[in-house]
Amino acid sequence: MTPINYPNGKKQESTLPQGASKAQSTISYGNRGMTLEEDLNKSNEYYLETGRAVIHKKPTPVQIVNVEYPKRSAAVIKEAYFKLASTTDYNGVYRGKYVDFEAKESKNKTSFPLRNFHEHQIQHMEAITAHGGIAFVILRFSTLNEVYLLDASHLISFWNDQKNGRKSIPKTEIETHGFLVSPGFIPRIDYLKIIDKMYFNH
Amino acid sequence: MTPINYPNGKKQESTLPQGASKAQSTISYGNRGMTLEEDLNKSNEYYLETGRAVIHKKPTPVQIVNVEYPKRSAAVIKEAYFKLASTTDYNGVYRGKYVDFEAKESKNKTSFPLRNFHEHQIQHMEAITAHGGIAFVILRFSTLNEVYLLDASHLISFWNDQKNGRKSIPKTEIETHGFLVSPGFIPRIDYLKIIDKMYFNH
């Protein structure tokens, strides 16, 4: 999609440090390999081309403050800011059902920090579930290169449990309640295979 | 959502003329009253708050070229461009079904110009329908202040018919195949009432 890297306005580990230049970010990015977002975009393209599902990443929400309209060329946005998303990043239709998810990665090895999500997203996933949609998260432990799919209900439980002091989901709980997505080449992250098991019983 | 007006990168009648200043656009905008987008955003908020449906407008797709990271303040996008959307603007879940639509307005009185849509959006709506989703367009004749809901299948027929020379949908055809949405106060555009009739038989 967008050829450069930029923070999405959320606090998460992959956010560039303040003051990082474009050139620096491109270099460190290259060292990290494909991001979860790139892998999912490629997988969604594959699903679309093969008629499996229609699932897209939503554009990054941006607050536009100033636009210039030069003569005989395209409008240029001269000042804008990253906004916090009020929903999740991905949605679409699969086997007639509404599908909605958020995807996050962490370098942690033993638990997944809940600061990767925010209150609006949790409320959104609750609403989706209440309306008969399929809502889940895709979690990558980037250091271990393991990807899990976890139904939103479990994320919501752990989210509400934060008042008891725990600010992350133990990996053992993700292994128990979630599903490991085996890595592949085409598609890279075949999460629909897991969706079939979890929500369609085969 | 975004407090200022800007073209969305698509050729459509509401796009500001090149060279138009922000101040000018605000004035002409004020004279036009609420836009279709604003009315739909308000209606979707109402649906969300009352637990009727979860339907959101996607963020405007923007190609980000240059971002600055000032110390101790938020990242500033210094150069970006409006991109053509590869999907429709609105989607979500209603009564367990995936719902997807595009909304456009025209000042024409006797027909709705097809240049308000583009090939990718038509393909997207075809795919949504094939996967069991509900796809439609909301068309406002702004001069007449009439809003119609038209199933994607009819739009697709007229789109494919363009090779025979007709570049717009006659209003009489929209009246025949579409449904008039009566104006309201809360919600302003109660399109779910029409969806109930069209897709749920009551």
Image (cartoon, coloured by chain):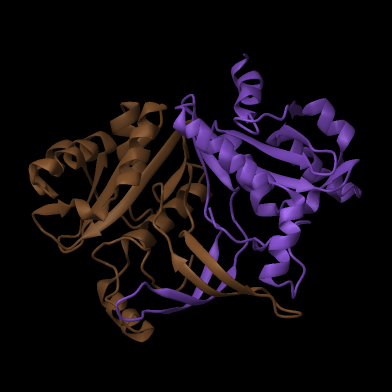
Chain colours: A purple, B brown
Task: Work out whether residue B60 or residue B147 is closer to the camera in this orientation and state it.
Answer: B60
Seen in the picture, residue B56 relative to A153 is either above or below; the reply is below
Position of residue B40 measured from the top left corner of the image (x, y, whole percent): 38, 55
> Residue at horizontal 62%, vertical 23%?
A193
Labels in figure, total: 0
Place of residue A112 in the rendered image (x, y in percent of width and height, measured from the top left): 83, 44
Instruction: Quadrant for residue A186, please give it.
Output: top right
Residue A185, percent across and down? 64, 30
Q: Is residue B183 among the parts visible in the rendering?
A: no
The residue depicted at 90 percent of the width and 47 percent of the height is: A166
Side (left or right) of B186 relative to A46: left
Quadrant of the drawing holding the C terminus of chain A? top right
Q: Nearer the viewer, residue B106 or A67?
A: A67
Percent of width and height locating residue A104:
72, 46
Horizontally, residue B166 falls left or right of residue A97, namely left
Residue shown at the point (22%, 40%) measured from the top left: B155
Residue at the spot 68% in from the left edge and 44% down from the top edge? A36
Residue A119 visible at all: yes
Q: On the rendered structure, is B182 left or right of B195? A: left
Q: Residue furthest top?
A: A202
In the rendered image of this protein, does residue A47 appear above or below residue B189? above
Residue A139 relative to residue A51: left or right: right
